[in-house]
Image (cartoon, rainbow, N blue to C red):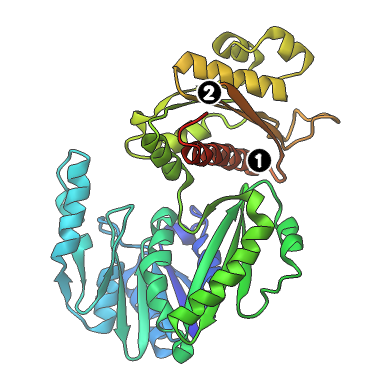
């Protein structure tokens, strides 16, 4: 099965936005056995977009994926272009319109009239729900070809593709094979080190292993094919467990799990609250936790304490600790965790302090060294991590590792019947 990818948006041509979709979709399609034959980028010009789509329809590819141009403004014309190129009328999807209106109602505002255009689709389209934004996607079948239309923003495109679009494609793979996946999200380890851990268990055929490196994160995607769904799932389950056993200590999430959301649910379920003290992560942990609706039920507050003075004055880290052990040390991390727990009155106090770089490193404290601590009950848990990569990778890795420490604690707390 071959695919063509069409990326719309004048901002892509001008270089104002980096086209990350080409890499993401190329890898995702390759992982399920679909070869990308051609990528095309086209600006927000109706005639040029129609020509590009008509040329793609005339070629031999089985699948065409179009991204971008699904917004409510006048330059968002992808749906109109597809309808015109295929000779299909646009039809209002009442369910989509209702969902878009509700998204605005939930924010306490009335839906602008311009957003109604996002609920119109070429006749016969299968609608792909958008759980993040207001622009649904669509799937169309035309002359033995499949067209998948996805929104431009990555945070909307990714869940839509991995949800409805991937399920559709699994049924379209040549030979009618069923395909199943398991994604392990790792932190605190490099891509090459992960491959070394897994090099002797196979994964070059069926079942297969693919790797994706992100700042502070490595994703290991395990896939399996079978003549039936049951066969694929059984093959996947056995192989995925082998992979999990090798990399379990580095896993912070699986599949589409959002770590901050999982932690929020565990905190609510166990009636616990949390406060956060951050140095090298600069508020990223607090931002992630409060991104989840309802986080005010369990998030007490956060303190970003970059300087030694703020660590001392706001968190109560002793001057003798800072002088003798330094800001990046096990002792400072533990004192920060206790301090933020005391100041916020939370049940759990989480802290992070480290060297994100590029400066600030020494022979004994290299770039990427991060300490994180969790004060809970009468105990303090502290971990030392060494993250590789640039500043952003160290910071993101620290966020994921710190949150994973909280997740592990909460799961153990729940298992113990609420004993700290």
Q: To which quarter of the image does residue 329 belong?
A: top right
Front residue of this view, candidates 250 and 315: 250
Instruction: Report crowding for label 1: few under 14, some 14 to 19, many 20 or more residues within 10 A (C-alpha).
Output: many
Residue drawn at the location 53% of the way across and 80% of the way down: 225
- Circles 1 and 2 in contact, beta carbons < 8 Å: no
Residue at the right extreme? 363
Front residue of this view, candidates 273 and 211: 273
- The x, y position of residue 217, in whole percent, is 61, 50
| Disc marking residue 403 | none
Mark with earlier residue (1, 2)? 2
Q: To which quarter of the image does residue 63 belong?
A: bottom left
Instruction: Report crowding for label 2: few under 14, some 14 to 19, many 20 or more residues within 10 A (C-alpha).
Output: few
Compared to 65, does 18 lie above or below?
Answer: above
Residue 36 visible here: no
Residue drawn at the location 16% of the way across and 59% of the way down: 97
Residue named by callout 1: 394
Q: Of discs 1 and 2, which sits in the foreground? A: 2
- The x, y position of residue 48, in whole percent, is 37, 74
Give the structural element (helix, strand or loop) at label 2: loop
| Disc marking residue 377 | 2
Residue drawn at the location 42% of the way across and 71% of the way down: 166
Compared to 410, does 208 lie above or below?
Answer: below
- The x, y position of residue 162, in whole percent, is 43, 65
């Amino acid at each position: 099965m071959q695919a063509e990818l069409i990326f719309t948006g004048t901002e892509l041509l001008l270089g104002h936005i980096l086209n990350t979709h080409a890499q993401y979709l190329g890898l995702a399609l390759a992982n399920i056995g679909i070869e990308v034959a051609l990528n095309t980028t086209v600006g927000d010009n109706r005639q040029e977009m129609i020509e590009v789509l008509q040329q793609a329809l005339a070629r031999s590819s089985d699948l065409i994926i179009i991204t971008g141009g699904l917004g409510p403004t006048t330059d968002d014309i992808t749906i109109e272009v597809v309808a015109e190129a295929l000779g299909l009328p646009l039809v209002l999807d009442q369910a989509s319109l209702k969902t878009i209106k509700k998204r605005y109602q939930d924010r306490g505002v009335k839906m602008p009239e311009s957003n109604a255009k996002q609920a119109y689709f070429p006749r016969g389209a299968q609608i792909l729900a958008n759980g993040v934004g207001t622009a649904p996607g669509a799937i169309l079948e035309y002359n033995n070809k499949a067209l998948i239309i996805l929104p431009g923003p990555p945070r909307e495109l990714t869940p839509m593709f991995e949800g409805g679009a991937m399920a559709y494609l699994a049924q379209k793979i040549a030979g009618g094979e069923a395909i199943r996946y398991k994604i392990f999200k790792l932190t605190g380890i490099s891509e090459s080190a992960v491959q070394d851990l897994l090099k002797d268990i196979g994964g070059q055929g069926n079942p297969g292993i693919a790797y994706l490196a992100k700042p502070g994160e490595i994703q290991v995607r395990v896939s399996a094919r079978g003549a039936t769904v049951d066969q694929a799932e059984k093959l996947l389950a056995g192989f995925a467990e082998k992979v999990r056993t090798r990399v379990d200590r580095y896993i912070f999430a699986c599949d589409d799990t959002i770590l901050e959301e999982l932690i929020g649910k565990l905190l609510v379920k166990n009636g616990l609250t949390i406060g956060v003290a951050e140095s090298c992560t600069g508020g990223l942990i607090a931002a992630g936790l409060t991104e989840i609706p309802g986080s005010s039920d369990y998030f007490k507050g956060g303190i970003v304490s970059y300087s030694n003075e703020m660590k001392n004055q706001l968190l109560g880290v002793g001057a003798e600790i800072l002088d003798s052990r330094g800001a990046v040390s096990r002792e400072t991390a533990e004192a920060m965790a206790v301090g933020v727990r005391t100041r916020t009155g939370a049940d759990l106090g989480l802290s992070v302090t480290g060297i994100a770089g590029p400066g600030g490193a020494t022979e004994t404290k290299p770039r990427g060294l991060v300490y994180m601590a969790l004060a809970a009950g009468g105990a303090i848990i502290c971990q030392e991590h060494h993250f590789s990569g640039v500043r952003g990778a160290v910071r993101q890795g620290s966020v994921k590792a710190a949150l994973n420490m909280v997740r592990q604690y909460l799961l153990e707390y729940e298992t113990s019947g609420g004993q700290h």
